[in-house]
Image (spheres, grey):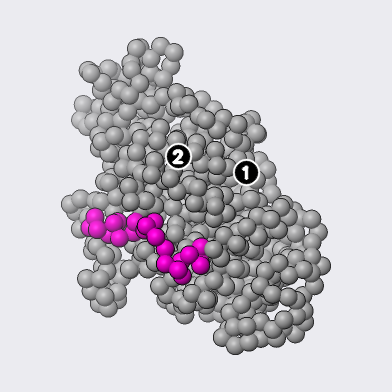
C-alpha cells in the first residue's frame, strides 16, 4: 500500500501530502512558503525537488496557524515544533532474514522505555536484551511511542501517531533496538492507541474536524472511522510501524472504544486484513493483539495465520482480576465482579474469559462478553501485573508489596506453564518492588486539571496517605519508577531463578505442543484445590493441580501422566503449591 499521508522521499526530492478538508489554503513552510495544491476530497499536495533528508517543515493553515505534520515521522522539538523529513529506506538492517516467531513461542514482557533503564532511551535498552533472552522471554513489548506533549508520560496521550517520541531517541535508534532484538531472536511488539488523541498538541480538529464525532471516550473525542481518510490514517499507521520499523506485532489499546459501524466492516477488520496481506507477501509472522473490555471472542483467533480479519489474542483482564482478588483480598472497583476468585480462575483456565455473557455489576449491570471456550488457549494473554493494574493504583505499588512471596510464586507457576501466552511486567521476573505510578508532563491548566482529577478519583487515598500519593506532574514520580538493575537481593535472585526454570520448561515441554491445543476443563473446590487440563496439539494432555490454601490437601484422585513440575502424581499438596503433569 502506497502511503497517503506525510512526507516521503522521492527520486527527485520530497513529496508532501496533508488531508485538510476544512482549510481554505495550506502552505508548506521550509526556508520559505510553498503554496500547496488542493486536490479532491480535501487533499493538499506538493513536491519539493532537491530537498535534503532531515529538513524541518511545518504546514501553515489559512495564514492563521502553523502546525506539524499529523503523519510526522519525527518531532525533534516535541509536538509543537517542526516535523523532520525522514528516509525510512536508508536504514541498514542487519537482521535482514528475520521473519519473526510463531505465536505459540511468545513470552511477553511489557516495558516502558523511559523507566526500563536509568538512561530511559532506546539505546540503553539494548544492553538489557541479553538478560531477557537468558530469562526465557521471547517478545519485548513497548508501551506507546507515538509523540506526546512533554518529556514524560505513559504514552497513551499520543497526538502524532507516526513519530516515535524524541524523549527516548531518534527513529534510527529505535530501529537499532529492534534490529538488535531480532539478532537475538527476540520479537518486538508496540502498544498503539487508535481510540483517541491526547489532549495537547493535536490540531486535526482545526483543519480536519470530520476526524471526530460528537461522542466521547473517557479520554477524548471519538474518532470517526466512517470517513475513509480517517480509517486509512490508522491502517497506514499500523503498516508504518510494521514495515518502517519492522515491529513483529501490535497491541491495540482499549479496542472497545474504537468506533464500530453497525452493518459495515470495522476499522479493526480492515487493519487485520491489510496486516495479513503484508505478512503473506513478506513471509513474516505478524501478530495483532487487542485490549478489549467487551470480551468479544468473535474478534479473536490465535490459529488464523496470517491475520485475515481476526486478532491473534487479547489481554485477559479477567484472569488477572481473579488472581488479584485471591492474593490481596481487594474488592474495590472492578474487583467487585470477582467475589469467588478460585471459581473465576477455574473458568478462565477452562475457557478463556470469566465473563462470557454474564451480568457485570461494574460494567453497568449489563451482559459482558461472548463465549470463548472454542478458541485456542493461546488466544489469551495472561498476566499477574501490567502497567494499568500497577499504575492505576494511587501509589503505583506492585503485587510484590501486596501479597506473600510464596503465593506469588504459585501464581507464576500456573501462569508461566499454562497453555495461554504469558506476560510479565518489567522487573517482575526478579520480583521488583519499584513502583510504577502514573506520570505526565503537561503544563498550565491541563496540569491543574490532571491533579484535580486524580484527587477526586482517589480521594480516599489522599485522605489515607496524604503527601505519600505521588504527584503525577513531579519529575521525581517518573524517577521513582526507574528499574534498579544495580543488584538483586538473595530473594530476588531466587525469584529470577524460578522464573527462568519455569520458562525453560515452557520452552521445552509446552510451546512445541501449543499449535492445535484446545481447552479442557477446570474445577475449584471449597478446600482450595484447583485442577485443570488441556488437550495439546500433539494429542497429549497437560494437567494442573494446585493448592491455593493455607492447609495441606490430598487430592481425591491422582493425575495420569508424567510429573514435569512440582511433585509426583498422587502426592499430598502442601499449602500453596503446584503440580503439573504431561502425558496421559
Q: Where, quadrant-wise, is the C terminus in this rendering?
A: bottom right
- Report the side of 293 relative to 559 (left or right): left
Secondary structure at numbered mark 1: loop
Is residue 51 placed above or below 249 in the rendered structure? above
The residue lying at 33 percent from left, 68 percent from top is 394
Identity of the residue drawn at 66% across and 86% down:
553
**Can you give x and y, in whole percent of width and height, for residue 162 in the image?**
40, 36
How many marks do you count on the picture? Answer: 2
Give the residues in magenta: 472-496
Q: Nearer the viewer, residue 257 or 341?
A: 341
Q: Considering only order in the chain, which callout, 2 or 1, is on the residue closer to the N terminus?
A: 1
In the drawing, does residue 123 fall left or right of residue 385?
Answer: left
Of helix, strand and loop, which one carries label 2?
Answer: helix
The residue nearer to you, when weighing 280 against 487, is 487
Find residue 332 and report its image quarter: bottom left
Give residue 508's quadrant in the image: bottom right
Label 1 vs label 2: CA separation? 17 Å
Query: Where does residue 566 sit, x and y in percent of width and height?
Result: 66, 72
**Residue 242 shows in the view:** no
Mark 1 neighbour class, 10 Å CA radius: few under 14, some 14 to 19, many 20 or more: some
Q: Which mark is residue 101?
A: 1
Question: Which mark is drawn over residue 177?
Answer: 2
Pointer 1 and pointer 2: residues touching (CB < 8 Å)? no
Q: Is 481 within the magenta?
A: yes
Amino acid at each position: 500500500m502506497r502511503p497517503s499521508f506525510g512526507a516521503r522521499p522521492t527520486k527527485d526530492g520530497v513529496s508532501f501530502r496533508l488531508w485538510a478538508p476544512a482549510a481554505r489554503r495550506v502552505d508548506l513552510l521550509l526556508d520559505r512558503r510553498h503554496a500547496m495544491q488542493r486536490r479532491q476530497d480535501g487533499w493538499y499536495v506538493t513536491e519539493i525537488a532537491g530537498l535534503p533528508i532531515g529538513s524541518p517543515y511545518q504546514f501553515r493553515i489559512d495564514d492563521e496557524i502553523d502546525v506539524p505534520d499529523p503523519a510526522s515521522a519525527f518531532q525533534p522539538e516535541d509536538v509543537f515544533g517542526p516535523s523532520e523529513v525522514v528516509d525510512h529506506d536508508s536504514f541498514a538492517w542487519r537482521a535482514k532474514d528475520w521473519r519473526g516467531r510463531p505465536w505459540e513461542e511468545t513470552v511477553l514482557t511489557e516495558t516502558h522505555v523511559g523507566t526500563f533503564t536509568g538512561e530511559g532511551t532506546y539505546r540503553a535498552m539494548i544492553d538489557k536484551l541479553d538478560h531477557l533472552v537468558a530469562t526465557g522471554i521471547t517478545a519485548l513489548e513497548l508501551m506507546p511511542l507515538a509523540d506526546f506533549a512533554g518529556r514524560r508520560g505513559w504514552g497513551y496521550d499520543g497526538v502524532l501517531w507516526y513519530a516515535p517520541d524524541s524523549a527516548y531517541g531518534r527513529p534510527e535508534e529505535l530501529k537499532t533496538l529492534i534490529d538488535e532484538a531480532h539478532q537475538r531472536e527476540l520479537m518486538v511488539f508496540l502498544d498503539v492507541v487508535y481510540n483517541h488523541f491526547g489532549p495537547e498538541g493535536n490540531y486535526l480538529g482545526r483543519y480536519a474536524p470530520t476526524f471526530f464525532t460528537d461522542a466521547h471516550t473517557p479520554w477524548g473525542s471519538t474518532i470517526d472511522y466512517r470517513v475513509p481518510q480517517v480509517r486509512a490514517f490508522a491502517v497506514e499507521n499500523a503498516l508504518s510501524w510494521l514495515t518502517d520499523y519492522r515491529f513483529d506485532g501490535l497491541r491495540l489499546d482499549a479496542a472497545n472504544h474504537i468506533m464500530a459501524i453497525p452493518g459495515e466492516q470495522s476499522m479493526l477488520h480492515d487493519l487485520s486484513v491489510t496486516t495479513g496481506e503484508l505478512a503473506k507477501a513478506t513471509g513474516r509472522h505478524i501478530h495483532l493483539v487487542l485490549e478489549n473490555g467487551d470480551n468479544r471472542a468473535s474478534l479473536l483467533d490465535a490459529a488464523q495465520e496470517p491475520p485475515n480479519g481476526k486478532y491473534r489474542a487479547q489481554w485477559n483482564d479477567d484472569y488477572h482480576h481473579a488472581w488479584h482478588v485471591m492474593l490481596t483480598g481487594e474488592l474495590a472497583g472492578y474487583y467487585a465482579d470477582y467475589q469467588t476468585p478460585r471459581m473465576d480462575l477455574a473458568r478462565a483456565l477452562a475457557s478463556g474469559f470469566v465473563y462470557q455473557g454474564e451480568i457485570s455489576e461494574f460494567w453497568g449491570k449489563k451482559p459482558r462478553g461472548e463465549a470463548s471456550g472454542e478458541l485456542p488457549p493461546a488466544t489469551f494473554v495472561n498476566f499477574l501485573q501490567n502497567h494499568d493494574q500497577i499504575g492505576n493504583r494511587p501509589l503505583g505499588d506492585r503485587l510484590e508489596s501486596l501479597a506473600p512471596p510464596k503465593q506469588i510464586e504459585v501464581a507464576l507457576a500456573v501462569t508461566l506453564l499454562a497453555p495461554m501466552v504469558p506476560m510479565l511486567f518489567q522487573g517482575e521476573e526478579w520480583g521488583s518492588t519499584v513502583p510504577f505510578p502514573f506520570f505526565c508532563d503537561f503544563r498550565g491548566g491541563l496540569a491543574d486539571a490532571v491533579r484535580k482529577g486524580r484527587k477526586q478519583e482517589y480521594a480516599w487515598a489522599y485522605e489515607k496517605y496524604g503527601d505519600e500519593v505521588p504527584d503525577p506532574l513531579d519529575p521525581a514520580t517518573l524517577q521513582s519508577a526507574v528499574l534498579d538493575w544495580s543488584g538483586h537481593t538473595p530473594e530476588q535472585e531466587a525469584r529470577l531463578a524460578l522464573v527462568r526454570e519455569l520458562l525453560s520448561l515452557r520452552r521445552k515441554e509446552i510451546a512445541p505442543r501449543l499449535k492445535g491445543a484446545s481447552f479442557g476443563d477446570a474445577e475449584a473446590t471449597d478446600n482450595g484445590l484447583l485442577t485443570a487440563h488441556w488437550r495439546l496439539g500433539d494429542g497429549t494432555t497437560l494437567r494442573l493441580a494446585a493448592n491455593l490454601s493455607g492447609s495441606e490437601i490430598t487430592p481425591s484422585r491422582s493425575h495420569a501422566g508424567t510429573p514435569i513440575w512440582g511433585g509426583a502424581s498422587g502426592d499430598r499438596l502442601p499449602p500453596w503449591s503446584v503440580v503439573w503433569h504431561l502425558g496421559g
